[in-house]
Image: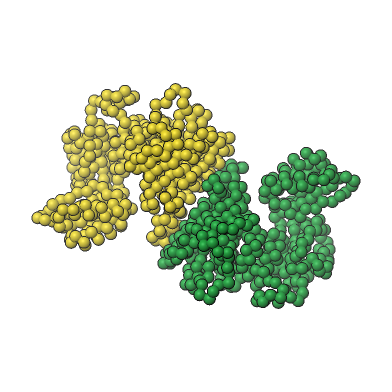
Chain colours: A green, B yellow
Amino acid sequence: MFSMPEFTVNQSEGSLPERINPVQKPVLVVQKYGGTSVGNVDKIKRVAKRVTSEIDEGHRVVVVVSAMGDRTDELVAMAHQINVHPPSREMDVLLSTGEQVSIALLAMAIQRLGYDVISLTGAQSGIHTSDVHKKARIEGIDTTRVERELKHGRIVIVAGFQGVDEAGEITTLGRGGSDTSAVALAAALSADKCEIYTDVDGVFNADPRIVPKAKKLDYVSYQEVLEMASLGAGVLHPRSVELAEKYNLPLVVRSSYNDRKGTLIKNFKTGSNDLKEDIYMEKVLVRGIALDENIAKISILEVPDKPGIAFRLFSALAKENIHVDMIVQNVNRTAVNDISFTVNVDELQEAVAVSQKFSFEVGAQKVEFDQGVAKLSVVGTGIVANAEIASKFFEALFEMGINILTISTSEIKISCLIDKARAKDAMVHIHEKFEL
Amino acid sequence: MFSMPEFTVNQSEGSLPERINPVQKPVLVVQKYGGTSVGNVDKIKRVAKRVTSEIDEGHRVVVVVSAMGDRTDELVAMAHQINVHPPSREMDVLLSTGEQVSIALLAMAIQRLGYDVISLTGAQSGIHTSDVHKKARIEGIDTTRVERELKHGRIVIVAGFQGVDEAGEITTLGRGGSDTSAVALAAALSADKCEIYTDVDGVFNADPRIVPKAKKLDYVSYQEVLEMASLGAGVLHPRSVELAEKYNLPLVVRSSYNDRKGTLIKNFKTGSNDLKEDIYMEKVLVRGIALDENIAKISILEVPDKPGIAFRLFSALAKENIHVDMIVQNVNRTAVNDISFTVNVDELQEAVAVSQKFSFEVGAQKVEFDQGVAKLSVVGTGIVANAEIASKFFEALFEMGINILTISTSEIKISCLIDKARAKDAMVHIHEKFEL
């Protein structure tokens, strides 16, 4: 058993992950199917065929599934008709039923094809989490049961998105939960790869619904996809990518509707022998453009400039499990700051409440928020070190007469907060400007 | 902790049931709401009000709920679209989600009204069952968790119809499951009474949908309602009534749509001081007429007349958990028997398969079955000892020109197997003949 920040693995076989297989060892694959892939009876039957084809090739398979199509939304709607602020614990009891229905139906579909199969809830799969309902983090996975079932030659179907806390309460993992379940299970089982099946062909260099000329990437590094994901590119939640990187687990994103290869996500190091790594050797590349329209900006104006002020605000937000992004602090005049940051719109109400309490306590002037913003980003390894890319990005926005509200950069991305109304056009223009 | 044939109670307080309350002790009520009572969001809100009104009166409440309206049927339909013979284990994983949705939504509705409440799945409620999926029997209830929540002043909402076996697998209790959950919990918690809420006003002396003049009974004994239930009167499943009788737990059947008193089911002993017991003192009464159209008759013809033959057949049927009723054995000629019995139509296919295997093994001539039969019964304490009632019953059938296929009697009922097509008319005629 070894322990890691996001979770602990309780491996019954006690060995460390070992992914270079001896020639004869069967491959262990963890597959994850999202809600659209199991949206109705026919789709579930199709997934069953895909799963069993892996078995026919001599592999062992663990399948993680989400709730069917819109079931989660239906359940949330019912809950809100009953109680505008339903208790989080009861929401988890409610929502976890969605995945439980999926695992049972998929197991039935696979059994029908003549294969040995068993479905397991999050708790039965040994997925232990923190006790923060609706936003639980995986703390450990006891793989004993899953490994026993695999040893008996069974296909194991696991309910994604859910786990159990120390007190035996049902928890859910929050956004990106099923992907995280799949990656964590794959890491804990030392799987050879983790395949994320979805309704698109892979990771694109821009959202194809907005940029018709967007191209699918065959290969992408964890870091690049991580930036794209956290910037709203949507295919994968950053949590699951971070976890895959931590365990150096190859991830494949592909469509459940066709047999195209999808996008392979792993570490591509310059000078290594990795296939295709040469794509990274010659020059800095803009690998993708990401747009996040699901954010809002909060500003706290005229905060007294004292040490520990920022710490107090952001620790109060962290305590409420509010994810904060793009923090900017501008000193306007003597001894007074303006602090701005962005949050997910879902968490705006809570974040404003925390900010207002903070504002009152420290004697700031007032709290403002703006839902009319979007975050547009260019992503690529080494991008920030290359001034040309940043200037080209800003130039493109200038050409369109778009004002930049906030700039934020990392090693491999540059993000600008701009007017939401112009964001999609800007994305198309930049895609062309960088000739992606 | 004490043990009983249907289940074992693990009581944290260790005392035997004690139902005569000292004046000040708050009453503990177990309420059960069926699927129609929680069929939609508005109905769930109505149930929440009914539950909290008990709290306002100073009582403690444990609520057992079924799946919403047609949800179980929807889930079964999906399963059958995927797999004509879905594995029983996976059916339990699937169906148990129905009650889990109900408990979460009802808890949200009650919390909304400002009361402290918690929902518990079958497993969380400590309902331990046998491992026979789809037909599990309650083996024990560990009330520790439920009692802890009650002690914290919470209303406890329990998922009916489900439990957990020794291996941690989800099980369901089969027909009448939620009623059984409620009665077993009430017994284990030494509750003062168990109220079964449904869509009718109580137990009637005949099915009001068939006999418009049918009357609601204010009081009825366990034995009478047991016969009526097992004869198809439908309001309560015999399992739950048997269990209530075993623990001498007063049961109330009433409507969740109005405040009428419903039917009280308990032991009414001649000569006791029970209210209204005098209704039983003077004469034998036909208390009700029951009709079961959901049965089929199986006959095994020309079975060699050897010792142990009946034992072999019925133990084979019991092993498959097939419930057998109205066994008749007619010796037709030397050394050869015809054996007939009835089963529930849902179990006909399985029962015929077992019978055919038996028939082949013992060298019987053939197996026949008939789905065109119905069982019509008159019920009342002491009925069989009163020849007048039996003859009146048979006379009524004769008046209508209806042939009696099989007769079966017990202390308190007389049942006839007749042509299903004539059964409803016969029921109306008998209701009039006995002036009910």
**Horizontal arrangement in the rendering, residue A31 relative to residue A224 (left or right):** left
Give the residue at the far left of this rendering: B334
In front here: B217 or B99? Answer: B99
Measured as percent of width and height from the top left, residue A295 is found at: 72, 54
Q: Residue at x 38, y 41 (%)?
A: B8
Measured as percent of width and height from the top left, residue A27 is found at: 53, 70
Quarter holding residue B378 = top left
Q: Residue at x 76, y 45 (%)?
A: A312
Q: Residue at x 48, y 36 (%)?
A: B147
In front here: A14 or A36? Answer: A14
**Horizontal arrangement in the rendering, residue B421 relative to residue A261 (left or right):** left
Number of numbered discs overlaid on the protein picture: 0
Measured as percent of width and height from the top left, residue A220 is found at: 67, 69
Q: Is residue A335 above or below residue A236?
A: above
Measured as percent of width and height from the top left, residue A83 is found at: 58, 42
In front here: B82 or A306? Answer: A306
**Horizontal arrangement in the rendering, residue A118 relative to residue B302 (left or right):** right
Q: Residue at x 29, y 24 (%)?
A: B272
